[in-house]
Amino acid sequence: MKKHLMLCVSIVSLLFLGNLLFLLNIASAQQSSTTKPANFRSGAMVNEVFQAGARALLIEDYCPWGCCSNEAALTALGIPYDLIHSASLANTNLCKYRFIMYASDQPQSYYNTIAANINKISAYVHDCCGLLIAHSCDMGWAGGHWTSILPGGVGHQNAYYNSIHITNPSHCVVSGLDDNFFANWNYSVHGYFTNLQPGTNVIMVVNASSSMPTYIDYQYGQGRVWASMHTVEWGYYGCNYPAGAQFLLNELGCADDYECGGCCEKVLNIVTELTSAVGAIEAKNDKVEVKLDGLGKAVKAIEAKNDKMEVKLDELGKLNKRIDDLVRMLNNLQNSTNRLEAKMDRPNVK
């Protein structure tokens, strides 16, 4: 009996130690959004994508933390999108999109290119009533750090936190979510925003006792900017820290319903119709120009004939003058003849 008891204790001990080692392995293997694993390779740049009827534009060079979460969420929501590299930004018409978005955790070259095109991006928001979703979480595995990528000169300060407090639960990006959802992502945010625009709507802060904004929504001209220091893609299902997909799905779903974007889209449709009408008018003008060109050639031909006729009329006038001269000569000759005959018919007078 004693042997059986000792055997049971040994088995229980082994199971306990095994579970403990398993948990320790999990804890030691938990990845951080700030520290790239030794075996991680970023791989090649993502492929550019162009879809029919695209309403969104994703500007991305590499999948954040190796996770193509933005593409997965857009596809899950059925939102047609284009994806371009940052290097293609300068030659891209932004105003045809309902919203455009940055990707988190990009290399330094990406942020440098965005900064070089900030005037174009700002004009898209300000003048095209567009929505910019700025996933501004930097200093991740790719190591990039940004300055001057947000309209209006909004800046940021890097710091790493695992506690988040929702200050505006009525905003659609946090619909159905609470503070616990964002807790302990290792890390949940990589900093907070500074130099906010007047009237900025702060959606989330570092914690309940702070005023350091981590997600902001502000108007810029006719459009809006939603900017986040959250590790949005990191927390998406299938990525390194599977906190849940709802945050990113909420954000992109709200963006696709954005009213100003819809207004912009209607304006763009009108512009497209006007462009088509102008094209049709230009095509007709081209035909008219061809006909006018033909008419011009005909007029020139008539003018050439008229010139020839004028030459002939001038020659005819000269001929008429010669005829008149001949007629006068004939008349004079006839008069002379008549006088001669009259003298011959008279009797000789001595």
Image (cartoon, rainbow, N blue to C red):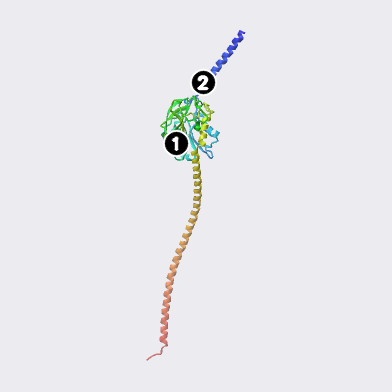
Q: Nearer the viewer, mark 1 or mark 2?
A: 1
- Nearer to the camera, 270 or 56: 270
Total number of numbered discs in the rendering: 2
Q: Residues within 10 Å of mark 2 (few under 14, many from 20)?
A: few
Q: Which residue is mark 1?
A: 219
Secondary element at tag 2: helix
Marks 2 and 1: in contact by CB < 8 Å?
no
| 9 over 209 or under it: above or below | above
Q: Is residue 263 visible?
A: yes
Is 346 drawn above or below residue 49 in the view shown?
below
- Kindly identify which residue carries mark 2: 27
| Local SS, label 1 | strand
| Residue farthest left in this picture | 350
How crowded is the residue under tag 1: few (<14 C-alpha within 10 Å), some, or many (20+)?
A: many
Q: Quadrant of residue 319?
A: bottom left
Going by the numbered disc 2, the residue's amino acid type is Ala
The answer to whether residue 44 is visible is no
How much space separates mark 1 and mark 2, taking CA atoms?
Answer: 42 Å
**Position of residue 25 measured from the top left corner of the image (x, y, whole percent):** 53, 20
Indicate the quadrant containing the N terminus: top left, top right, bottom left or bottom right.
top right
Tell which residue pokes out farthest to the top in this image.
2
* Direction bottom: furthest residue: 350
For marks 1 and 2, the one nearer the N-term is 2
Q: Position of residue 350 (x, y in %)?
A: 37, 91
Q: What mark, if any, has residue 79 been given in the picture?
A: none
Q: Residue at x 49, y 41 (%)?
A: 263
Which three-letter amino acid code belongs to the residue tagged 1? Gln
Q: Position of residue 16 (x, y in %)?
A: 56, 15
